[in-house]
């Protein structure tokens, strides 16, 4: 990480391991997608293979995305006001829904709810859905925005609005992680016959 790239011999020396052991570990890391290798040409001699982190490997190191998001949202709120922040979240919800709506076209409501639940899982929500007598209920056991949502309630409203826009139906929120529940709950009423 500190050097950006290294060859087997450099790693073996730094780790006090044999070159064979280092090669075995590098092979595993490369197969798993944590590192990439490539030839490095030198002015003299043969090229050497060097290894560096892949995007997946880089993602293993701590990041402060929640902190940055919190600071950006706070700055927008201070400079432009609460209404502007709400307007921005509305725009994000609209754009996200517009970009995914084609996946729901021509499908039944239960299929749509299943697909939307899958989209939530792609975002890290750990969601599932159940059918009750009166509605389809989406249960999300994780909030990928939790740390930011603790200080910006607009995120919860954004999530609810995104679901309503995407399903083109009213969506009611029940339980919420922000209100000491163990999950967020979204209800989509069944059509009345």
Image (spheres, rainbow, N blue to C red):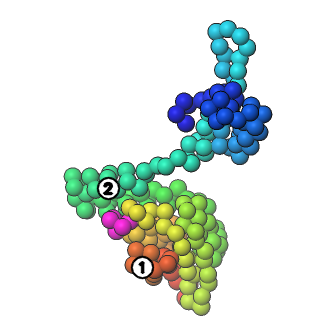
Distance from the alpha carbon under mark 1 to that under mark 2: 23 Å
Q: For mark 2, does the 10 Å Cα neighbourhood hold few (<14), some (14 to 19), or many (20 or more) residues?
A: some
Residue 24 drawn above or below residue 184 = above
Q: Look at 56% across and 48% down and name the residue there.
A: 60
Identify which residue, 145 or 57, lies in the foreground.
57
Residue closest to the eye, 161 or 52: 52
145 relative to 116 in the view: left or right: left
- Which residue lies at the image location 38% right of the left edge and 69% below the top edge? 157
Which mark lies nearer to you, 1 or 2? 1
Q: State the residue lying farthest toward the top.
A: 44
**Magenta range:** 149-155
Rendering quarter of residue 41? top right
Residue 77 vs residue 99: left or right?
left
Q: Does residue 191 appear in this view? A: no
Which callout, 1 or 2, points at the residue further toward the start of the chain? 2
Task: Report helix, strand or loop for mark 2.
Answer: helix
Tell me if 117 is positioned left or right of 82 in this view: right
- Judge the density around disc 1: few (<14), some (14-19), many (≥20) Cα neighbours within 10 Å: few
What residue would you read off at disc 2? Answer: 73
Which disc number belongs to residue 180?
A: 1
């Amino acid at each position: 990480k500190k050097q950006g790239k290294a060859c087997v011999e450099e790693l073996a020396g730094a780790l006090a391991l044999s070159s064979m052991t280092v090669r075995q570990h590098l092979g595993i890391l490369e197969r798993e997608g944590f590192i990439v290798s490539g030839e490095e040409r030198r002015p003299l001699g043969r090229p050497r293979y060097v290894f560096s982190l892949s995007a997946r490997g880089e993602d293993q190191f701590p990041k402060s995305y929640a902190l940055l998001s919190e600071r950006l949202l706070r700055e927008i709120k201070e400079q432009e006001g609460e209404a502007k922040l709400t307007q921005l979240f509305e725009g994000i919800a609209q754009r996200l829904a517009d970009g995914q709506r084609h996946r729901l076209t021509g499908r039944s409501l239960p299929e749509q709810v299943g697909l939307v639940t899958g989209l939530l899982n792609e975002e890290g929500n750990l969601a599932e859905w159940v059918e009750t007598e009166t509605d389809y209920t989406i249960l999300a056991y994780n909030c990928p925005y939790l740390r930011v949502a603790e200080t910006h309630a607009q995120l919860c409203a954004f999530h609810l609005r995104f679901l309503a826009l995407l399903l083109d139906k009213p969506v009611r929120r029940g339980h919420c992680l922000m209100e000491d529940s163990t999950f967020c709950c979204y209800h989509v009423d069944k059509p009345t016959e």
